[in-house]
Image (tube, coloured by chain):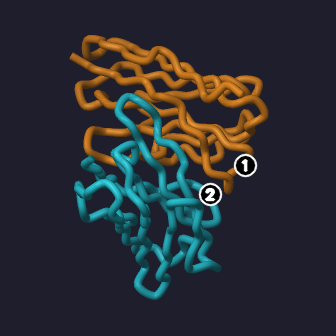
């Protein structure tokens, strides 16, 4: 069984540029999460989807961040415009339901110069 | 304010000995607790969990203990192996299911 796939694995951009991350969850997993992990910190939830519905986006900075999960499968997280403080690892995770331990992808390491 | 705290940033143990990683939480509504292991350049991997109705859960070399009155849980690894060297994250959730993570403890197991 393939795991959670994320791309790109690494991204370097100039500040004020847009950037997008893509996630393909494990087949059949209805719940999808985007987490942000800063250096030396644990993952912090940005947004959680149940199928195509965002059920918790309270921690998503909506002035510059957006996310979508069309057809309840793949998901894209976008930042526009990126700021220096956005440099971090962006993790996607999926699970069969909200109370099952999520499986994490390898993450996308973003560097904003 | 941190709801899940791992107060030891690092821990070093000798191969074959016991590793004990600790975690404290503040939210009494948490009822499900998990441990994840993370290697460099990889995502966290689920290790073991425990529900608040239990005080111990064991899986091979890994045992998690929960003390609800103290709002404390610990992960015991016996015996420790060099391949266990990684960052360990404690996480907790309530009824809504969202995980709150601690900052992690870096475990080094020396041969």
- Left or right: where does residue A45 sit relative to residue B24? right
Can you name the residue that lies furthest to the bottom here? B69
Image coords of residue B92 (percent x, y): 50, 62
- Residue beneath the point at 62% across and 26% down: A68
Examine the image and state in which quarter residue A64 appears: top left
Mark 1 Cα shell of 10 Å, populated few (<14), some (14-19), many (≥20): some
Residue at 61%, 45% (x, y): give it. Answer: A102
Tell me which corner region of the image, top left, top right, bottom left or bottom right, holds residue A23.
top right
> What shade does chain A have?
orange
SS state under label 2: loop
Mark 1 belongs to chain: A
Task: Give percent across and percent down for residue B62.
Answer: 50, 61
A22 to B91, vertically: above or below: above
Question: In the image, are marks 1 and 2 on the same chain?
Answer: no
Residue behind mark 1: A97
Image height check: is B28 above or below A110? Answer: below
Residue depicted at 26% across the width and 11% down the height? A14
Chain ID, cyan in image? B
**In the image: residue A56, left or right of residue B79:** right
Host chain of mark 2: B
Number of marks in the image?
Answer: 2
Question: Do the residues bearing badges 1 and 2 touch, measured as CB atoms within 8 Å?
Answer: yes
Q: Looking at the rendering, in which quadrant would you find the N terminus of chain A?
A: top right
Q: CA distance from mark 1 to mark 2?
A: 9 Å
Q: Nearer the viewer, residue A9 or B100?
A: A9
Q: Nearer the viewer, residue B108 or B106?
A: B108
Residue at image mark 2: B97
Q: Residue at image x 44%, y 47%? A: B37
x and y percent of residue A95 in the render? Answer: 67, 43
């Amino acid at each position: 069984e393939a795991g959670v796939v994320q791309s790109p694995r690494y991204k370097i951009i100039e500040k004020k540029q847009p950037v997008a991350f893509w996630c393909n969850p494990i087949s059949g997993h209805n719940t999808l999460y985007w987490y942000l992990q800063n250096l030396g910190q644990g993952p912090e939830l940005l947004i959680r989807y149940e199928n195509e519905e965002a059920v918790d986006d309270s921690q998503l900075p909506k002035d510059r961040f957006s996310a979508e999960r069309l057809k309840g499968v793949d998901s894209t997280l976008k930042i526009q415009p990126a700021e220096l403080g956005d440099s971090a690892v962006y993790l996607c995770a999926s699970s069969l339901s909200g109370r099952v331990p999520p499986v994490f992808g390898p993450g996308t390491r973003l560097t904003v110069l | 304010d941190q709801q899940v705290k791992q107060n030891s940033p690092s821990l070093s143990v000798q191969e074959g000995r016991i590793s004990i990683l600790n975690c404290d939480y503040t939210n009494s509504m948490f009822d499900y607790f998990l441990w994840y292991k993370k290697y460099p350049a990889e995502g966290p991997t689920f290790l073991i969990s425990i529900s608040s109705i239990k005080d111990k859960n064991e899986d091979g070399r890994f045992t998690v203990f929960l003390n609800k009155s103290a709002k404390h849980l610990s992960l015991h690894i016996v015996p420790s192996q060099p391949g266990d060297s990684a960052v360990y994250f404690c996480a907790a959730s309530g009824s809504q299911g969202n995980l709150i993570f601690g900052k992690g403890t870096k475990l080094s197991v020396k041969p």
